[in-house]
Amino acid sequence: MTTASNYRLMTLLLGLLCVFPAFAKFEKEQAALDALMAKRQYASAAEYIHSRPNLLNEPRFFRQLSHILTNYYTFQVNFGLFATRDLKEGERLEDVRGAKGDHKMVGGDWEKSLYDTLKKHPESPDINFAVGEYLSLGQLCGCTSLRLFRGEQADDFFYFERAYKGDVFDYWSLFRMGNHYAGGPSPDLKKATGYYEKSLKLNPDYTEIHYNLASVYYSLGDYKTAKKHSAETLGKYPNATLNADSYANYGRIEAALGNYSSAEKNYQKAREYVFWHAPTFNELASLYRKTRRFDAYKKTVNDYIALDYGNTYTFNVYVDYLADHKLIKEDREIVTELAKRQYSRTEEIGAVFFNLGRIAEMEENTALASQYYAKSLEAVKKLPNPPPGAIEALTQYINRLQSKGPNSGS
């Protein structure tokens, strides 16, 4: 799964829960709470539950309060203290979040509240859902600092699983359960697909479900279904990198179907979003190799490296690609041309010849690798502020190669 699998649009929330057990008790209170939420009176809704002990002690209302705090907050501290507000007509949550204004703090130390409540109701589907949602959203934003839920206790899957067995779930919990089965050391892609499909039924517009389904079906070899889901992700993200991911993924599926022209167009579209996008470079390079378009292959590599000769990132991507796919004649031509090229900046010489040395080592040409590393070291020493550790590292590279003795190369 890609870093895209952590993406979530808060505006896609489908209410407090899509599926939950029906209760005759507290019907009036539930209706009042639903009315406040419909009007986006988030602070009033949170306070409505928190100020009524009979509701706060009821697991389903505690879960709903937790949902409000973790999804509709306007201010938070380490994802443990939450404040929210009632939105005015025309206001959007994303516009007022973190902005100056009145924010009503509700709930206190929420991690502790969840931890203590779970101890009281360890088998409650509602409380387990609340804990799973809290942990998953905290992980999503990368802003949490857990003190009580540590180690295995911080894995949202186990709480969502308990909640699911008690018929408490929504599209987000199903999505996270799908992620659990799609990743990890022992993935179960069929189970992942099942949870993703259930999640999609609850929220057909959630782009990330389509993206993950496309990836899973691709891994299962069902390229036709993968293509259907991948098409639903194209250009749907508010983020350039995620859009690049979506077009690269679609291109990869088209390539698997033998639609090479479409694959190339989608890879180029991905590069319009992020030219240095590594997955796109790797897929495009492989496509040109497979279709024996070696001139296009060389141009793609050279243009990618030339983005900034002094920045090792793109050259590193190319070297990593070679480590997985081995060198062909065109790669050796690229290396020769780069070694002969005149560079205008000292940092360019240092960066380029360092990576040329790495490629020479792949070819087991220790003499040439040592020569390239020496040229890189000479350039790095001339820099007024050489990268920390660069001189020492290059010196060690050269000493290591010299200890092996000369060879004739390949």
Image (cartoon, grey):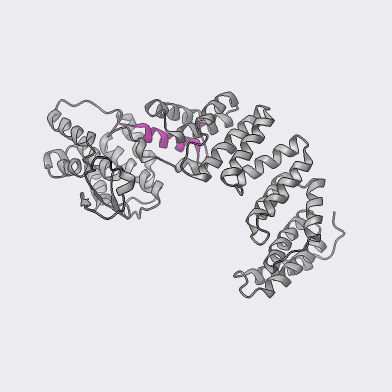
Q: Which residues are magenta?
A: 169-189
Q: Residue 188 magenta-drawn?
A: yes
Q: Is residue 124 visible?
A: no
- In the image, residue 391 sits, relative to residue 52, either above or below, namely below
Q: Quick check: 175 left or right of 37? A: right
Give how far across and how far down residue 85 sits, in percent.
22, 47
Q: Measuring 22% from the left and 44% from the top, which residue is drawn there?
A: 117
Q: Please tell me which residue is depicted at 26% across the width and 41% down the height of the picture.
A: 68
Reply yes or no: does residue 135 show up in magenta.
no
Q: Which image quarter is the C terminus in?
A: bottom right
Q: Residue furthest front?
A: 90
In this rendering, would 35 be left or right of 165? left
Quarter of image, res 310: bottom right
Between 10 and 359, the one lying in front of the other is 10
Query: Looking at the picture, how far across and down is residue 46, in whole percent?
Result: 20, 43
Q: Where does the image place residue 296, in percent across and percent down from the top left? A: 75, 42
Across and down, in percent, residue 139 comes to 39, 48
